Image (tube, grey):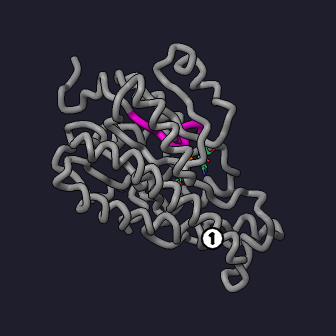
Amino acid sequence: MTDPLFDLSGRVAVVTGGFGQLGTELAVALAARGMRIAILDRATEPPERLRERLSDGVVRAHTCDVTDREAVEAALGLVEVDWGVPHVLVNAAAIDAPPDAPAAEVGPFEEVPLGSLEHVVHVNVLGVVVPCQVIGGAMARAGRGSIVNVGSVYGLVSPDQGLYDFRRAAGETFVKPVAYSVSKSALVNLTRYLATYWGAGGVRVNTLTPHGIENGQPAPFVEAFAARSPLGRLMDVSEAVGAVVFLASDASSYVTGANLVVDGGWTAW
Ligand SMILES: NC(=O)c1ccc[n+]([C@@H]2O[C@H](COP(=O)([O-])OP(=O)(O)OC[C@H]3O[C@@H](n4cnc5c(N)ncnc54)[C@H](O)[C@@H]3O)[C@@H](O)[C@H]2O)c1
């Protein structure tokens, strides 16, 4: 039985960052619920899990830098020709300092190069603003739509630098950089801004705040995370799906400007 409250069949979703860990999971999960999915990602090599869906045409991929307005407009044009104006936009594309980031980027706050901060903010904030302008704008003209901006617990509270003690114990100078926190906190209020801006226009805008998705992290990190998590563990990527289905579907028809926190209780204490 399909519960009409959560029924997404026949609708169209754009998932930015759809070749990434979370984006792939969401693209597959929404496709399994009868949606057609357009992925916007600057990566060109699809993950294995998407190949079947890409070959049967339920999922399409558009190589696209989401900070590039012309590229996003071009991708939307192609989506609209065959599928019409999207019903759902999930903004999951983002960057963070990789484990092998240059020492200065993960060094003391006082010394962080402003260029690296600028780059992360550029991708993580403008990379949500631009798809909202272009795709959200089209949704507003159609008078309906749901946008999910993927934030992070690090956009709500500070990283616990103790989580990374194992790196310092191994002789590295490692400070979880401020750039990601700055960029993700901006999304919470971008969401509120757009929720009020488009409220009467039928487009709902919400933040999804996940935390700590299991992805083969080093054992000392997993242990340190578990010790600080009320649920005592990292999150399986599939545990983000229910929240996105809720926010995308009519089940959340009166929910806008909200922040749905899926963090295993991390921010509860
Ligand atoms: N993994 C976690 O533990 C975690 C926790 C909290 C929040 N998040 C958030 O969830 C979202 C997805 O994270 P993930 O772990 O799947 O990351 P990921 O690195 O696996 O995927 C990110 C995707 O975004 C794409 N991308 C980056 N910059 C882009 C650009 N300018 N244009 C187009 N595509 C671009 C990348 O190619 C990649 O496919 C992000 O917003 C992230 O901040 C992740």
Answer whether residue 158 is magenta in the image. no
Amino acid marked by disc 1? Glu
Image quarter in which the N terminus is found:
top left
Q: Is residue 263 visible?
A: no
Q: Indicate left or right for 163 with 253 as reference.
A: right
Q: Residue furthest bottom?
A: 110
Q: Which residues are magenta?
A: 13-22
Q: Residue at x 45, y 37 (%)?
A: 76
Percent x, y of residue 73:
48, 43
- In front here: 201 or 151? 201
Secondary structure at numbered mark 1: helix
Res. 220 image quadrant: bottom right
Residue 234, above or below 159: above
Which quadrant: the C terminus? bottom left
Reading the image, the residue beneath label 1 is 118
Other-residue count near label 1 (Cα within 10 Å), few / some / many at <14 / 14–19 / ≥20? few
Front-lying residue, 196 or 8: 196
Q: Using the rendered view, name the quadrant where residue 62 is placed.
A: top right
Closer-to-camera residue (138/157): 138
Q: Position of residue 221 (x, y in %)?
A: 65, 57
**Residue at the (45%, 68%) spot, across then down:** 185
Q: Is residue 230 left or right of residue 227?
A: left
Residue 223 versus residue 186 in the image, above or below:
above
Whether residue 126 is situated above or below residue 246 in the rendered picture:
below
Q: Position of residue 248 (x, y in %)?
A: 30, 40
Image location of residue 255, percent across then percent down: 21, 51
